[in-house]
Amino acid sequence: MEKSIENIIRSLEPDRNDLLQKTPARVARSYAEIFSGYGEQVDEIASTFYDSPMDEAIILKNISFESTCEHHLLPMVGTVAVGYIPRGKIIGASKLAAIVDCFAHRLQLQERLTLEISGAVVDLLDPLGVAVYLCAEHFCISHRGVKKTGASFVTKHFCGEFKQNYNLRAEFLAEVK
Ligand SMILES: [Zn+2]
């Protein structure tokens, strides 16, 4: 990783040596943090479950996330809402946020991130339904190419009862949008 960063710096600033002293190691450390999701497993993050008779949607919304677009290696920054209808089993609310980070802290496409979050909740809880809503700004849209600042990219995924029941889906979207 450090060698690769060094090569990028050399290609941008062939005559600078001061930047090669500490920057490659510093960037490598920050990449380890930004891409910490590769070392994480969902079933290790969320391994404690609780019984619950709750039969309405449980929603954690406005979960901030930062990820990295795999096409341009540029940030995407936004919020996620995750909802599920339990089938007798729930997890701590913070675990939903940790699941988001586990997948966000990898090279990503927002579409895949949406499906991975949804799939993880299905695998962990076997709930009656799952709903996921993401809204993010992509730096590859705002800082290069078409350069449209403030454009929001929205992706959603519904399964189980959220897929079948339009009212449930509408209720979820009204809650999180
Ligand atoms: Zn991109």
Image (tube, helix red, strand yellow):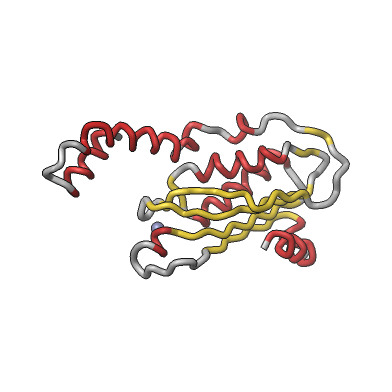
Q: Residue 111: x and y, percent?
A: 52, 57
Q: Residue furthest left?
A: 15
**In what quadrant of the picture does the C terminus appear?**
bottom right
Place residue 52 in its image quadrant: top right
Q: Residue furthest right?
A: 53
Q: Residue 58: x and y, percent?
A: 77, 49
Q: Residue 152: x and y, percent?
A: 52, 65
The answer to whether 141 appears left or right of 167 in the picture is left
Q: What residue is at 54 percent from the left and 55 percent from the top?
A: 78
Q: Quadrant of ligand 1?
A: bottom left
Q: Nearer the viewer, residue 38 or 73?
A: 73
**In what quadrant of the picture does the N terminus appear?**
top left
Q: Residue 21: x and y, percent?
A: 22, 32
Please give the count of numbered marks on the rendered protein: 0
The answer to whether 102 appears left or right of 173 in the picture is left
Q: What residue is at 37 percent from the left and 50 percent from the top?
A: 73
Residue 152 vs 77, above or below: the answer is: below
The answer to whether 145 appears left or right of 83 in the picture is left
Q: What residue is at 61 percent from the left and 53 percent from the top?
A: 80
Q: Nearer the viewer, residue 96 or 64?
A: 64
Place residue 168 in its image quadrant: bottom right
Q: Nearer the viewer, residue 127 or 83?
A: 83
Q: What residue is at 73 percent from the left and 54 percent from the top?
A: 160
Residue 131 vs 45, above or below: the answer is: below
Residue 164 vs 120, above or below: the answer is: below
